[in-house]
Amino acid sequence: MKRNLLLVIGMVVISLALVLSLVGFSACTAGPTEFGTIDISSQQEGLWVSGEGKVTVTPDLATLYLGIEAQADTVAEAQSQAVGAMDAVMAALAASGIAEKDIQTQYFSIEQVTSWDKDTGEEIVTGYRVTNMVTAKIRDIDNVGSTIDAVAAAGGDLVRISSIAFSVDDPSAYYEEAREEAMADAKAKAEQLAYLAGIELGKPTYISEWSSSPVSSREIYYDAAVPAPMPTPISPGELDITLTVQVAYAIED
């Protein structure tokens, strides 16, 4: 009787030990835990590299940010001044060869102009300001300076010219060239890494790319009280079109 009891107890102890050992083994191979152990099964296999391609181009499109700002004692008077000046600016843009589809309103506002009255300790309304700002795309880069001069002359003291941005109207061909360079750069890096590691490089298993629109923006400070030189000198400079790819290559057995 006692011998049988000891035998049963021994079997229970062995069973518990076996269960605990299996749990421990499972915990060691289960992967990531809250303490940050590495999950080998989740690592992406293969050889991962990035490549960059860059093409330098001359801008063929200028976007001018301009408009009118008028201030008067009443809204009606301020708006009347703004409308008259803006009509003259629009006529100057059209005469400079700017198509109607290339002119877009960006900002319009009618707001009070106030000042602080020291005697009464209150803010008082001293007038009203009307602002009308548009963007104009100039597709002939050589005419940027003369267009600015024409707008300044048409709008007079009410004209506001704040900035100009240079870009490429259709950069698709340049992106294709940059993409070829980026892929060649990635492949060269992968081949070198494979050689150094003593492995055989396989075919790409994953490819992604990202890029940004090439735009060069510059501020323009125009003061109607100071005569501008004729014509206004404008230099578009150059733009860099950059494209980056990430490629994963398989490793041959």
Image: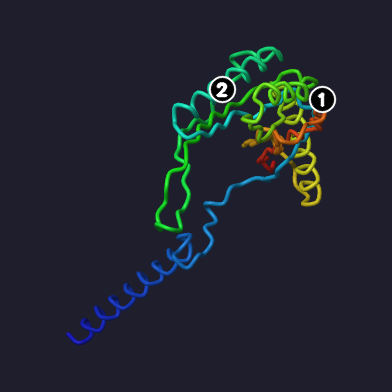
Residue placed under numbered mark 1 in the picture = 231
Please tell me in which quadrant of the rendered image residue 228 appears.
Answer: top right
**Circle 1 Cα neighbour tier, 10 Å, few/some/many (<14 / 14–19 / ≥20):** some
Between 7 and 67, the one lying in front of the other is 67
In the image, what residue type sits under mark 1? Pro
**For the view shown, which residue lies furthest in the left direction?**
1
Q: How is the image coloured?
A: rainbow
Report whether 33 appears left or right of 94.
Answer: left
Q: Earlier in the sequence, mark 2 or mark 1?
A: 2
Label annotation for residue 126: none
- Where is residue 22 shown, x and y percent of the image? 40, 67
Report the mark closest to the observer, 2 or 1: 1
**For the view shown, which residue lies furthest in the front direction?**
119
Between 121 and 186, the one lying in front of the other is 121
* The N terminus, quarter of image: bottom left
**For the view shown, which residue lies furthest in the bottom direction?**
2
Residue placed under numbered mark 2 in the picture = 104
In the image, what residue type sits under mark 2? Gln
**Circle 2 Cα neighbour tier, 10 Å, few/some/many (<14 / 14–19 / ≥20):** few
Between 65 and 181, the one lying in front of the other is 65
Please tell me in which quadrant of the rendered image residue 203 appears.
Answer: top right
- Under tag 2, what secondary structure? strand
